[in-house]
Amino acid sequence: MPSERSAGQLPGNVLLFQPFHFDLLGGVDVVVENLWRGLERHQPGLATIGIQDWVEEGDKTDAEGRRFLHLNLPQPPEGGLVATLRYLVTLGRRIPRIVGELRRRNVAVVNFHYLTLNVFPLVLIKRLGLWRGRIVLSFHGSDVLSVDPRSAAWRFVASQVDEVTACSKALAGQIKALGLFRGEPRVIYNGIDIGRFLGRADEAASPVAKPYILNVGTFVSNKGQDVLVDAFAQVAAAYPQLNLVFVGGTNNGVWLAGLRAQVAAQGLERRVFFLENQPQRQVAALMQNAVCLAHSSHREGLPIVLIEAGACGLPVVSTRVGGIPEIVESPDQGLLVEAGDSVAMAAALRVVLDSPAEATRRADTMRAKVTRLFSGDAMTAGYLDAYSKS
């Protein structure tokens, strides 16, 4: 290994840590994967994806060459003397293993994505002087709701972190309002490798006949798919050939079961399709063949799915929440409605369906914007700057 690193290189390696298994079924996984690939292009071997794992530990490499470290960073308990004592014993056993893994990999930066108190053990290790790298916390949306500024554990975390990032200006405002972290949150927009994403569409065929409206998102209540079902019911009779396709991670299946019951109650079983746990190539293929993307969330950070739709030249109808107005800034780029308003959502869908030339023009404008502002390279450059600041 050379004794000096070239310009732009970090003094060590990067661990991109997320508190759940990596399956590319949620937006955070996709962001982390895009960032890993960007860092790999910048400097091969620089980054590893860390996975919170209570069972397995150690290194793994998948078929696409992505490197993973399965590691257990236990969260502190919410309260109680007995639980706290047990946690301290567990942490005492875990710390030597964690420190050993960081040193073995020459990790200079640990970047936590989607925040939980799994960050606490690493913060303690840094405070004790057992590791002297940088800790970067990256918020992605609803994770900000889990941060309690009154919590002693969170206050301790905030005292030790080096940088806090947010994927949108709106989310940065929420983080700042906590009054917990030092300095201004750094805004780094999510980005995608546009060429790679579009190329993946060639690897799969769309499983649903055209025309169809597409929704992409994990089947959970805050994604608002029930509102979109109601909106589709309002337009279905006027467009008898049109279908609605939902694709996303199943989660625990409860919300999905409710959506299926809602569809059945409205007599739309033959026109509404639920595709569970689909790979990224299938999502790309579905986008390439859809009439529009209808995004119905009640809250968001900066949804990667809107950026993917923009890259595909797919017209967008979305709710006006979180960082979405930072992607779709005007009606020339896409149509925004208020969250929970199925009547407004239906009206926006009619505009797209009745004026396809105008919808295409908006989509072309959005594609140019995504290419300029939401590329994987732009995102990677933002994170590299956050990693290297002293």
Image (tube, rainbow, N blue to C red):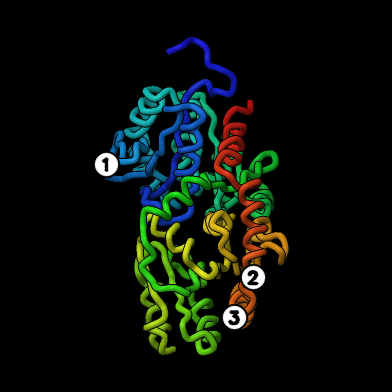
Confirm whether residue 251 shows in the render.
no
Mark found first going from the N terminus, 3 or 1: 1
How packed mark 3 is, by other alpha carbons closer than 10 Å (few <14, some 14-19, many 20 or more), is: many
The residues bearing labels 3 and 1 have C-alpha atoms spaced at a distance of 47 Å
Left or right: 360 in relation to 205: right
The residues bearing labels 3 and 2 have C-alpha atoms spaced at a distance of 19 Å
Where in the figure is residue 321, as x and y percent of width and height?
A: 63, 64
Where in the figure is residue 96, as x and y percent of width and height?
A: 35, 27
The type of residue carrying mark 3 is Ala
Where does label 1 land, which residue?
A: 56
The residue depicted at 58 percent of the width and 57 percent of the height is 310
Relative height, residue 154 to residue 121 (above, below): below
**235 or 96, which is in the foreground?**
235
Relative height, residue 160 to residue 359 (above, below): above
Secondary structure of the residue carrying tag 1 is: loop
Left or right: 225 in relation to 270: right
What is the quadrant of the C terminus in the image? top right
Where does label 3 land, which residue?
A: 346
Location of residue 317 (image quadrant): bottom right
The residues bearing labels 1 and 2 have C-alpha atoms spaced at a distance of 53 Å
Confirm whether residue 181 shows in the render.
yes
Left or right: 382 in relation to 94: right
Secondary structure of the residue carrying tag 3 is: helix
How packed mark 1 is, by other alpha carbons closer than 10 Å (few <14, some 14-19, many 20 or more), is: few
Please state which of the two labelled residues, at mark 3 or mark 2, is closer to the viewer.
2
Mark found first going from the N terminus, 1 or 2: 1
Residue at far top of view: 3
Mark found first going from the N terminus, 3 or 2: 3
Where does label 2 land, which residue?
A: 357
Relative height, residue 288 to residue 257 (above, below): above
**329 or 130, which is in the foreground?**
329
